[in-house]
Amino acid sequence: MVEKEKKGKIPRQPMPEQNPKARARNFDEVPLGYSEEVAMLEATRCLQCKNPTCMAGCPVDIDIPAFIARIKEGEFASAIAKIKEKNVLPAVCGRVCPQEMQCEKTCVLAKKGEPVAIGRLERFSADWERAQGKVSTPKKEPSTGKRVAVVGSGPSGLTVAGDLILKGHDVTVFEAFQVPGGVLVYGIPEFRLPKAIVAAEVDYMKKLGVKFECDKVVGATVSVDELFEEGFDAVYIGVGAGLPIFMHIPGENLIGVYSANEYLTRSNLMKAYLFPEFDTPIIRGKDVVVFGAGNVAMDAARTAVRLGADRVRIIYRRSREEMPARIEEIHHAEQEDVEFILLAAPLNFIGDENGRLTGVRCQRMELGEPDESGRRRPVPVEGSEFEVACDTAVIAIGAGPNPLLTSATRDIRLSKRGYIIVDPETGKTIKKGVWAGGDIVTGQATVILAMGAGRKVANSIHKYLTLGW
Amino acid sequence: MFQIVYREEMAEGTVVLNEVMAPGIAAKAKPGQFVMIRANEEGERIPLTMAETNQEKGTITIIYQIVGKSTALFKTLKEGDSYLDIIGPLGRPTRIEKTGRVTCVGGGTGVAVIYPITKGYKEAGNEVTAIIGARTKDLLILEDKMRAASDNLRVCTDDGSYGHHGFVTDVLKEILEGEGTDLVVAIGPVAMMKFTCELTKQYKVKTVVSLNPIMVDGTGMCGCCRVTVGGRTRFACVDGPEFDGHEVDFNELTHRLQAYVNDERVSYKSFLKGSKC
Ligand SMILES: Cc1cc2nc3c(=O)[nH]c(=O)nc-3n(C[C@H](O)[C@H](O)[C@H](O)COP(=O)(O)OP(=O)(O)OC[C@H]3O[C@@H](n4cnc5c(N)ncnc54)[C@H](O)[C@@H]3O)c2cc1C
Ligand code: SF4
Ligand code: FES
């Protein structure tokens, strides 16, 4: 039946999703994934271009038409094998990559408004493999006897570890938290990226032979120099951008005002959404406001919905066009009745005599001249102050570099804002044997860019271990 | 896993001491630093300052008061049992210098925190007076250790059952009026630190306090532990836990410590119910 239809006539297959009313009360994953039939149907939409423009948009060079062709033939095992040649975390990327800005943006069919659903097909392939229960492990090269320490277990660290273990090196990952995964476990919520998937990816790494040492804060428990003394030959720093940025306005320390990092860490990593079954509490606000409009803000707002809020409002100082979150996330938030107060910025928080948050005073903004980011700069409108009642506020306006490790490590160079400066081609720092990549170099970016950086570094470390600095 | 090698109950079972195997942390820890600790998969991460470390044995000693679900759960752990996670050493160590006359004031379980600091100041060649207090005699902890760690120990109880009848601040005032002191270090309940600082401010004596806000990670990534010091927001876990007491906004800290009182009650109640049946 599928074969008879003319190519290009089949519409882009929609993603089945949990209905908004039901999902607003649970933490289960929202998109349900393609069935085999739908995946194969979607795969037939691919034109198998001679010059696949989609690949130009992929930061890790996945052979997109090749894996899609295999799905079309129903050869799912070989499809996932193709993806894994270039991407060690396909189940994650298929869920959280901004494909609309990457491969799906450059797909030739995007011109007609309906690019091939590459991300959904990637996710399908990875989920199919996991469901089979037997995950294939590629062949490892013989042991080189060289030891690599990877600091931080986010997507960049996992990529470095996964690549280097296959090249025969002995890899140990040091993680400050009790579980590996970085932002994938402490930041991105369960309903967008189930933690079981991250755990499966980590287990896969363990199966390959990667060792994980959790509860180890490098810079506190052990220093980078001590890692070398312990016999590591190379060190990769992938500690992310884990410093919360506050707004520095009056009342910010009232009870009920959270950084997005704290709010999401309590809920995701510490499982406060399961309190009191889990011990870590979180304020289940009735009236929640979230500042910022990136993915982090959407995650915080949608978490608040699920924690039982009556009303959740996102306050953003620019307009809808400038919102940095993925379109899909904004759309999901709206479906879950999250409201948007655009062109407004907070002036100060208001609290009661017990130091608890009761509201926030804001000011209207209008867009002026473009700033250095190219986006029009918001300027305050005189006399436009207004108050928003709230019992919980989450500040999701960005993150910076945590100085814990960088300030304790001599001989690495930092930018004015505290990020690590590296050689853009190799990821080398100026300290011999030390590389860095991911958010601690670029500032908060994306999972796939962190993985791309990890890939580049892994190649450079391999060269160093086999040929020299 | 971090095994408990020695366990002792103090203050009529309201306070528990655990000596725990944690060689990596023991090798590095300095007075004033803390660890984040978690008993099991469902558990909270709790900050506790180390009272002692033993590099040869590879152990750290923590002393905690039973105040809620998490510490009640810790209390159920026996010698040979283990904590699931211990992360550290965290926070800045105490800046121990030769200053001259130092007075170390400890209240409640704060005595456990001030003990290694007291020892450190004495070892650095200072003349150290220690003042420790508790509500009543039976709740007093570490008296012998504090006596050994200082040149002169003064004990107070609120009810007069032992030592001076009254608060640690009474004795401190005597000292400030009398022989004087160059530095005060005060660690204990927020109210005690606050009153101590109000007193020493009048005498213009520099006072260091160790703050105990609620924490999540303890590594500077969440901002849960923020405190206002000198009008600026600081993260106690990485910028502290010790700060100039005269600059600390104690009222804000008192409020923030109450953030989850209701949840804590729910959690503790369900724990007590669960452990009974
Ligand atoms: C809430 C949220 C939602 C996001 N949503 C998306 C999305 O939908 N799509 C997308 O592409 N990107 C998203 N991002 C961004 C993306 O997650 C990051 O760009 C990416 O995770 C960066 O990877 P990394 O490996 O550099 O660092 P991280 O993932 O931050 O991992 C760093 C790890 O290092 C550990 N660490 C830190 N310091 C130390 C130390 N001293 N010693 C040992 N370990 C240490 C940390 O605990 C952490 O586990 C989101 C980010 C957040 C916060
Ligand atoms: S550009 Fe689009 S249609 Fe062409 S190969 Fe890539 S996914 Fe298929
Ligand atoms: S406890 Fe999270 S920043 Fe201090």
Image (tube, grey):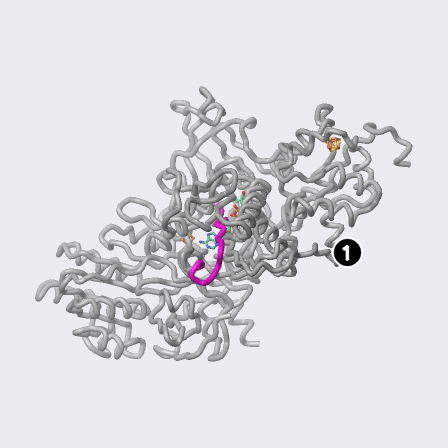
Location of residue A264 with respect to A65 vertically, above or below: below
Mark 1 highlights which residue? Answer: A132
| Residue B205 as seen in the image, left or right of residue A46 | left
Measured as percent of width and height from the top left, residue B255 is found at 36, 53
The residue carrying pointer 1 sits among few (fewer than 14), some (14 to 19) or many (20 or more) residues within 10 Å by Cα, namely: few
Q: Residue at x 81, y 28 (%)?
A: A8
Residue at 52% from the left image edge and 26% from the top image edge: A319
Q: Secondary structure at mark 1?
A: helix
Classify residue A236 as left or right of residue A45. left
Chain letter behind tag 1:
A
Vertical placement of residue B149 versus A93, above or below: below
Closest to the observer, B244 or B65:
B244
Q: Nearer the viewer, residue B186 or A370?
A: A370
Q: Is residue A65 magenta?
A: no
For the N terminus of chain A, the image quarter is top right
Q: Is residue A234 magenta?
A: yes
Query: Which of B176 and A21 lies nearest the eye of the viewer?
Result: B176
B79 up-or-down from A171: above or below:
below
Q: Residue at x 88, y 36 (%)?
A: A2
Q: Residue furthest left?
A: B178
Q: Which residues are magenta?
A: A227-240
Which quadrant holds residue A329? top right
Tell me residue A259's x, y (percent).
45, 45
